[in-house]
Amino acid sequence: MSTPHTTDVPADERERHFEWWHHSHPTFAGITGFFAGMLFVTAVPGFFAGVLRLLFSYQTAEKLFPFVLLALALPIAMLVKRKTRRFAQFMFVGMLVTAAVVLGVTSLVLYFMVDA
């Protein structure tokens, strides 16, 4: 009865032991894409607004804020390339779900505030 030791495994396999998640693992692209979409919807506009506010006056930053929509070029470009398409699809799902939750909660809060 032999037990596998690191000396029994070729050096190439030992170096590539943790590369499994880079190569089309069924859940890696979905989970990371979904959470990347959530982060993209929440963090990118906030970061962009903060940088604009640091660099420009309030009125100028307010006029330049719609340019945050140019950030959507990144996930759209990822949809084009076959290797990143699955990640980008889940990223869009994460973006849509996050936007729906934020809009739903906002509408409920506004409804209860106006009703009160």
Image (tube, rainbow, N blue to C red):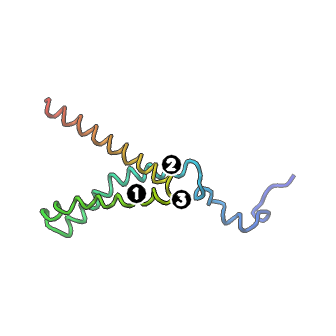
Q: Earlier in the sequence, mark 1 or mark 2?
A: 2
| Image side of residue 57 versus residue 27, left or right | left
Few, some or many residues within 10 Å of mark 2 (<14, 14–19, 20+)? some
Front residue of 88/43: it is 88
Instruction: Pinpoint residue 56: horizontal percent, then vertical percent.
Output: 17, 68
Residue closest to the far front: 80
Instruction: Pinpoint residue 3: horizontal percent, then vertical percent.
Output: 81, 55
Residue closest to the far top: 115
Q: Give the residue type at disc 3.
A: Lys
| Image side of residue 47 versus residue 110, left or right | right
The answer to which quarter of the image holds residue 70 is: bottom left
| Gap in angstroms between the C-alphas marked 2 and 3 | 13 Å
Few, some or many residues within 10 Å of mark 3 (<14, 14–19, 20+)? few
Q: What residue lies at 36% left-to-right and 60% top-to-bottom?
A: 73
Query: Which residue, given by chain and number where applicable, does mark 1 sit on?
Result: 76
Residue 65 badge: none
Instruction: Pinpoint residue 94: horizontal percent, then vertical percent.
Output: 41, 47
Instruction: Pinpoint residue 41: horizontal percent, then vertical percent.
Output: 33, 52
Residue 83 badge: 3
Q: Give the residue type at disc 1.
A: Ile
